[in-house]
Amino acid sequence: MPNDPTPSHRTAQQVDAKTERKLRARRDGAPGVWSGLGMMGLVGWSVVVPTLAGAALGSWLDAHHPGAHPWSLALLMAGLVLGCLNAWRWVAQQNRAMHEADRPADSSVND
């Protein structure tokens, strides 16, 4: 009965899912400290690069096409927003991939 709502059946499913995750982590190896630092660096650079590019383009536009409003501040903010959206998309994609890797183990329990 795959849809059995009894607490013992749910507990058995949770134990099976945790066991499968532990076995997969033991087989694949847990990510180390350097992996975590590398991911933080990747997220940081994905924000910094568009921000600095926006500031540089804005500074160039201010020098060559002066106007009533400064381009550098507007493009700095646009680059920051673009970088934050890019980092958020990347983290959400990694989170989704991590949860999809767990999904087959959770749904493969059939009694």
Image (spheres, rainbow, N blue to C red):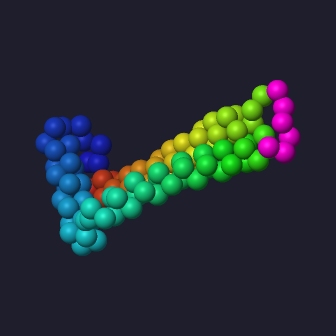
Q: Which of 28 and 53 is in front in this view?
A: 53
- Looking at the image, residue 30 lies above or below residue 100: below
- Looking at the image, residue 55 lies above or below residue 66: below
Tell whether position 66 is magenta. yes
For the C terminus, give its image quadrant. bottom left
Q: Nearer the viewer, residue 98 or 52?
A: 52
Task: Specify the quadrant of the image occupied by residue 23.
Answer: bottom left
Residue ID at (64%, 40%): 76
Confirm whether residue 100 shows in the render: no
Tell whether position 94 is magenta. no
The answer to whether residue 26 is left or right of residue 70 is left
Residue ID at (26%, 48%): 1
Residue ID at (63%, 36%): 77
Q: Which of 94 and 33 is in front in this view?
A: 33
Q: Which contiguous range is marked in magenta? A: 63-68
Q: Residue furthest left?
A: 8
Q: Where is residue 2 in the image (x, y as percent from the top left)?
A: 29, 48
- Looking at the image, residue 105 lies above or below residue 72: below
